[in-house]
C-alpha cells in the first residue's frame, strides 16, 4: 500500500521546490526560465529529482532520504540564484504546470534511454534499486 507519510510529503515539497526553478511575468519570466533550462547543473538536478520521485512513487520499498533530498533541492535553488534568478521567480515556477510536464517528459525519456517503461512498476523499482546500489546521485537520494 502506498501510504502518505511525512517523508513523502516533505519529499514532494522538495520536488516542488526544485522543479520550481523559474518565473515572474512576461519577458523577465522567459529570460529566467531559459537561463535555468540552459544550465546543465540545474537541468541534470531536476532530472535526478523527477526520476527519484517517480521511483519513490512506484516502489513501496524505496523511500527518499529526506535531508539529502531537501539539501539537493536547495542546492539547485542556490545555483539558480547564482545565475541571477530571484527566489520569488524560483518559487513561481513551482506552480507552472507546463514546466512540470516538461520534466515528466524528461523523466519518461530517461527511463526509455535505459530500456525501461516508466509505467512498469517492477522495472522502475529494479532501476531504483540499481541506482541505490551504484551510489548514483539518484540512488543517494533514495533508500
Image: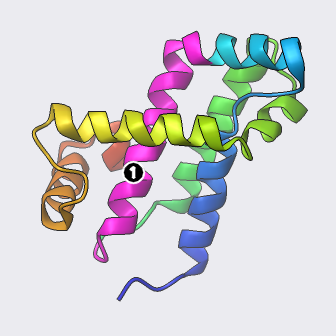
Residue 142 seen: no
Quarter of the image containing the N terminus? bottom left
Q: Specify the segment rendered in magenta.
A: 37-61
Q: Does 113 appear in magenta?
A: no
Q: Position of residue 29 (x, y in %)?
A: 82, 20
Q: Look at the image and name its color scheme.
A: rainbow
- Residue 122's spot in the image, x, y percent? 14, 66
Magenta portion: prevailing SS class: helix
Up the image or down, 24 lies above or below 34; here it is below
Left/right of residue 96 with respect to residue 53 in the rendered view: right
Please provide percent x and percent y for residue 49.
Answer: 47, 44
Q: Residue at x 66, y 58 (%)?
A: 13
Residue 61 visible in the current orientation: yes
Q: Residue at x 38, y 56 (%)?
A: 54
Q: How many marks?
A: 1
**As drawn, which residue projects farthest toward the left?**
115
Q: Is residue 47 above or below residue 97?
A: above
- The quadrant of the picture occupied by the C terminus is bottom left
Q: Residue furthest bottom?
A: 1
Q: Tag 1's secondary structure?
A: helix
Hey, which quadrant is residue 96 in on the image? top right
Q: Is residue 4 left or right of residue 16?
A: left
- Rate crowding at label 1 as few (under 14), some (14 to 19) or many (20 or more) other CA atoms within 10 Å: many
Residue situated in front as seen by the camera: 5 or 2? 2
The residue indicated by pointer 1 is 52
Is 53 magenta? The answer is yes
The residue depicted at 13 percent of the width and 58 percent of the height is 123
Q: Position of residue 51 (x, y in %)?
A: 37, 46
Amino acid at each position: 500500500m502506498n501510504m502518505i507519510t511525512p517523508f513523502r510529503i516533505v519529499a514532494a515539497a522538495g520536488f516542488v521546490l526544485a522543479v520550481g526553478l523559474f518565473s515572474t511575468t512576461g519577458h523577465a519570466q522567459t529570460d529566467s526560465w531559459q537561463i535555468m533550462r540552459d544550465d546543465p547543473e540545474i537541468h541534470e538536478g531536476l532530472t535526478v529529482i523527477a526520476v527519484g520521485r517517480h521511483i519513490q512513487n512506484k516502489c513501496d520499498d524505496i523511500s527518499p532520504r529526506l535531508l539529502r533530498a531537501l539539501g539537493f533541492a536547495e542546492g539547485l535553488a542556490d545555483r539558480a540564484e547564482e545565475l541571477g534568478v530571484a527566489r520569488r521567480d524560483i518559487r513561481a515556477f513551482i506552480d507552472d504546470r507546463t514546466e512540470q510536464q516538461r520534466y515528466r517528459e524528461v523523466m519518461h525519456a530517461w527511463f526509455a534511454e535505459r530500456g525501461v517503461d516508466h509505467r512498469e512498476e517492477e522495472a522502475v523499482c529494479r532501476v531504483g534499486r540499481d541506482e541505490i546500489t551504484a551510489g548514483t546521485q539518484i540512488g543517494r537520494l533514495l533508500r
